[in-house]
Amino acid sequence: MTLAEVAERCYHITSSYLASSSDSAIVGSTKEALNLTRRYFLQDVFTQWNPFSKKLSFSYNGGKDCQVLLILYLSCLWEFFAESVGSSQYPAQYHQFPLRFLPTVYINQTETFTTLENSIESTRKRYFLSVYESPQNQTSMPEAFKKFLDVHPQTEAIVIGIRHTDPFGSDLDCVQKTDKNWPTFMRIQPLLHWKLANVWSLLLYSNEEICGLYETGFTSIGSINSTVPNPFLKKSHSDLQNPFQWEIENAFGKRKEDINKVRVSKLSSADVQLFAGCSDDEYYPGWYLVDDSLERAGRS
């Protein structure tokens, strides 16, 4: 498989989702959010920074928001490429997808779960990411991006998966220059308007493998020392229903024998031991939670 084939698959995932006939209110609002992000990429971002040049990079940290944004980004890359081929005077067989790997930056600031680290490595291979990883715990966020730009000086804009409900996200714009105390580049933030339910809906429908921590009750993943499963997902405290059964059963390319399964990465042995020594509580999967105000309840 190549990056071109992965991008085309992501395009078919999003197109299939948009063409679905589900009457779910969550699916309806997610379609609206998806189309707005598409317009941001295709009409605003890609027209200013050619995604096939070295001017645009992608920020990835392995979380659910970044993975949804990566699927959308690759989908739009394929759509942008297909549109250019369609308007060319030369037949399609004379056009080649311009990228073999996607320029990506991973700011590794905290000691996190090995399950997440393994998931990031797996994602790097599956999505053909050319990853620059900052040294763990050695620099601040601005310093880490400065070192990335020293290595990739042609980068002018970086795609970032932040939403309005995230800390410090409420006043951000889709396209925004970095603050004075940061290295200079444009922040591309086309996921700001997405809600937690929208993220889960498209991610579960995509049938792509997601980090296994989410199946064990995590809804937001940070440092190993400050992150626990979301307390609002304790099975002993509430009787919750899965809001995304339609997405799971009708997921893209799903086989009949896997109708009720969600593709998640395997928990690392180190994390299994860590969880075994912490609590006897059982938790619903992270996607059972759709309240944005409770998303980070497991973070301190």
Image: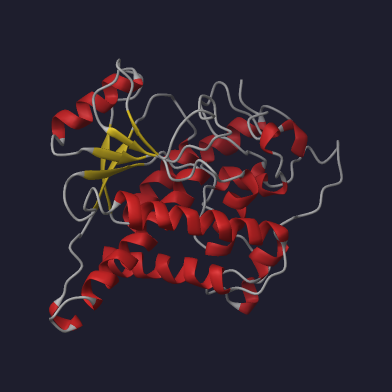
* Above or below 189: residue 73: below
Identify the image quadrant of the N terminus.
bottom left
Residue at left offset 25%, top offset 77%: 86
Q: As displayed, is residue 117 above or below residue 208?
A: above
Tell whether 292 sits left or right of 67: right
Percent coordinates x, y for residue 17 in the rendering: 55, 68
* Near-viewer residue (31 or 232): 31
Q: Nearer the viewer, residue 230 or 293?
A: 293
**Quarter of the image where one finds residue 6:** bottom left
Query: On the rendered image, what quadrant is the C terminus found in?
Result: top right
Examine the rendering and report whether any part of residue 2 can be seen: no
Q: Position of residue 108 (x, y in %)?
A: 36, 29
Instruction: Give the camera-side residue of 58 and 176.
Output: 176
Q: How is the image coloured?
A: secondary structure
* Residue 64 place in picture, x, y as percent: 52, 45
Q: Residue 148, located in which quarter of the rendered image?
A: top left
For the view shown, which residue lies furthest in the top direction? Answer: 181
Lateral position of residue 286 relative to residue 82, left or right: right
Measured along the vertical axis of the image, is residue 90 above or below residue 143? below
Q: Is residue 253 left or right of residue 77?
A: right
Residue at the spot 86% in from the left edge and 40% down from the top edge? 238
- Residue 115: x %, y % from top left: 49, 41
* The quadrant where residue 58 appears: top left
Residue 236 showing in the rendered view: yes
Residue at 41%, 68% (x, y): give it: 11
Q: Count the marks: how many? A: 0
Depth check: give the residue in front, 241 or 179.
179
The residue depicted at 76 percent of the width and 55 percent of the height is 242
